[in-house]
Image: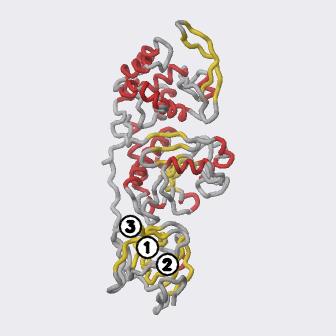
């Protein structure tokens, strides 16, 4: 196949309702294999009219109106790259309720001939030979082979554009030729759309390219502009040369590595999306980096806390292999999820009888409590108590410290409550080379006693520690 066909093919999203053969044929026909004025100067492959994020390009075009060819001036969308043109083409058919109904026969078509004819009959193009031209291109270039596994193993996310060029001066001020992909966890419970919406209205020089949740991959910045997400400085490699992908819902269970069902789906969608980005640029999985690689920040925190970084890269590789073979994604059985131990690792359950006070700076989930009987034991496998969270600004006094599953844990009683139950909460990720008193936690220790007779004097009063 030609380089133009290959470029169009590798940018086709996995969830497309338009058959890949038809997409490529339309691109060939309507852009003269990428050589038309509209394709060269506006990256518009499909002749879609209007404006894209306020950008448009006006050309003289011939249209078949009232039984004859007429020359008219028309405004067409101007895209940052082919990628956005192809994604917008797919979104066009369901962009309004009227279009969804009008193009129903197009969207329901299962073979290229039916779909090509449905495009013409539904009024997508005015050329009376449009369907025949598409079919001829598909058969001449053997494009039907592209449809063989289309959608067979698709994860099923939708690609959405929410770019806001008016914010680029804050969030994406530099042009960029990307070198790699950087993976993040969002550290909140927002959907991808809400994550992007917040960034688009906040001029704080913190940004990313794509947010992905269990249903959508929402693009905020084109890949030819930078994003400030790596924390390695204004001119750092991550901030200037990486495509940044945020995986949503990482705080669904609080800041302790919990993986909700929708988070796991978002993680899988991110692995597939990343594979398509690698395929688009001709990269290997060695181009996939984590936020931690650039600035040392513990991110993507859920993936790291569950020991899944290698699993994630292997999953990306599996999808990439499938894409190269013509499928849309890898089987979900390609690799198995790692097992995460629920038993404390490397220490006895007694831990240390340190007493102290902790003030949270992030929302942290709390484990269920138990009555104060017997020797102190870390009940790590107990279910989460409903509504039990430490929120930013909350303090607790604790009387025991453990490390388990890669985290520092403490036992405490809620200040202001009358019950005598103990509860458990992780305070941060454990670095084996750093002691508890010097660890980077999700808040701060305002008082700590490591003496043998240390204890909490008053559970309800901050810093009431002996």
Label 1, secondary structure: give it: strand
> Does residue 343 appear to the left or right of 190 in the view shown?
left
Identify the colour scheme used. secondary structure
Residue 98 screen position, x and y as percent = 46, 28
First reached walking from the N terminus: tag 2 or tag 3: 3
| Quadrant in the picture for the N terminus | top left
204 or 310, nearer to the observer: 204
Residue 360 screen position, x and y as percent = 53, 72
417 or 346, nearer to the observer: 417
Q: Nearer the viewer, mark 1 or mark 3?
A: 3
Label 3, secondary structure: give it: strand
Mark 3, Cα crowd under 10 Å, few <14 / some 14-19 / many 20+, is few
> Does residue 239 appear to the left or right of 27 in the view shown?
right
Q: Are marks 2 and 1 in contact (CB under 8 Å)?
A: yes
First reached walking from the N terminus: tag 2 or tag 1: 2
Is residue 460 positioned above or below 120 on the image? below
Disc marking residue 386: 3
Q: Residue, x 54% and y 75% (percent of image)?
A: 359
381 or 440, nearer to the observer: 381
Dot 1 corresponds to which residue?
425
Is residue 172 positioned above or below 355 on the image? above
Disc marking residue 366: none
CA–CA distance in space, label 1 to label 3: 14 Å
Q: Is residue 316 visible?
A: no
Dot 2 corresponds to which residue?
396
Q: Nearer the viewer, mark 2 or mark 3?
A: 3
First reached walking from the N terminus: tag 1 or tag 3: 3
The residue positioned farthest toward the bottom in the image shown: 453
Label 2, secondary structure: give it: strand
Is residue 149 positioned above or below 132 on the image? below
CA–CA distance in space, label 2 to label 3: 18 Å
Mark 1, Cα crowd under 10 Å, few <14 / some 14-19 / many 20+, is many
């Amino acid at each position: 196949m030609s380089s133009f066909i290959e470029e169009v093919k590798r940018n086709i999203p996995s969830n497309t309702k338009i058959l890949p053969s038809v997409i490529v044929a339309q691109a060939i026909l309507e852009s003269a294999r990428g050589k038309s004025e509209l394709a060269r100067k506006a990256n518009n492959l499909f002749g879609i009219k209007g404006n894209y994020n306020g950008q448009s390009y006006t050309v003289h075009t011939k249209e078949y109106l009232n039984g004859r060819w007429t020359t008219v001036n028309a405004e067409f969308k101007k895209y940052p790259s082919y990628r956005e043109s192809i994604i917008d083409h797919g979104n066009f058919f369901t962009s309004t309720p009227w279009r969804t109904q009008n193009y129903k026969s197009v969207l329901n078509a299962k073979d290229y001939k039916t779909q090509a004819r449905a495009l013409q009959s539904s009024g997508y193009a005015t050329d009376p030979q449009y369907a025949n031209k598409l079919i001829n291109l598909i058969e001449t270039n053997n494009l039907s082979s592209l449809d063989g596994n289309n959608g067979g193993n698709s994860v099923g996310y939708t690609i959405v554009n929410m770019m806001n060029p008016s914010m680029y001066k804050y969030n994406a001020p530099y042009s960029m030729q990307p070198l790699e992909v950087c993976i993040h966890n969002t550290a909140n419970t927002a959907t991808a759309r809400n994550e992007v919406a917040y960034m688009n209205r906040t001029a704080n020089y913190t940004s990313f390219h794509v947010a992905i949740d269990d249903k959508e991959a929402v693009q905020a910045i084109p890949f030819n502009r930078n994003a400030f997400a790596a924390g390695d400085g204004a001119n750092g490699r991550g901030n200037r040369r990486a495509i940044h992908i945020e995986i949503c819902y990482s705080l669904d269970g609080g800041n302790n590595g919990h993986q909700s069902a929708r988070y796991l789906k978002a993680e899988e969608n991110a692995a597939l999306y990343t594979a398509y980005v690698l395929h688009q640029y001709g990269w290997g999985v060695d181009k996939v980096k984590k936020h931690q690689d650039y600035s040392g920040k513990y991110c993507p925190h859920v993936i790291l806390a569950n020991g899944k970084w290698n699993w994630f890269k292997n999953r990306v590789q599996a999808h990439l292999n499938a894409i190269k073979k013509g499928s849309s994604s890898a089987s979900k059985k390609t690799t198995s999820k790692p097992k995460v131990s629920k038993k404390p690792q490397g220490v006895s359950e007694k831990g240390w009888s340190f007493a102290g006070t902790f003030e949270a700076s992030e929302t942290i989930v709390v484990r269920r409590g138990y009555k104060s009987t017997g020797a102190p034991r870390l009940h790590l496998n107990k279910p989460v108590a409903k509504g039990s969270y430490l929120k930013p600004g909350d303090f607790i006094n604790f009387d025991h410290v453990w490390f388990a599953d890669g985290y520092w844990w403490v036992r405490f009683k809620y200040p202001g409550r009358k019950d005598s139950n103990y509860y458990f909460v992780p305070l941060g990720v454990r670095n084996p080379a750093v002691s508890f008193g010097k660890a980077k936690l999700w808040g701060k220790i305002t008082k700590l006693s490591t003496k043998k007779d240390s204890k909490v004097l008053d559970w309800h009063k901050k810093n009431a520690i002996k």
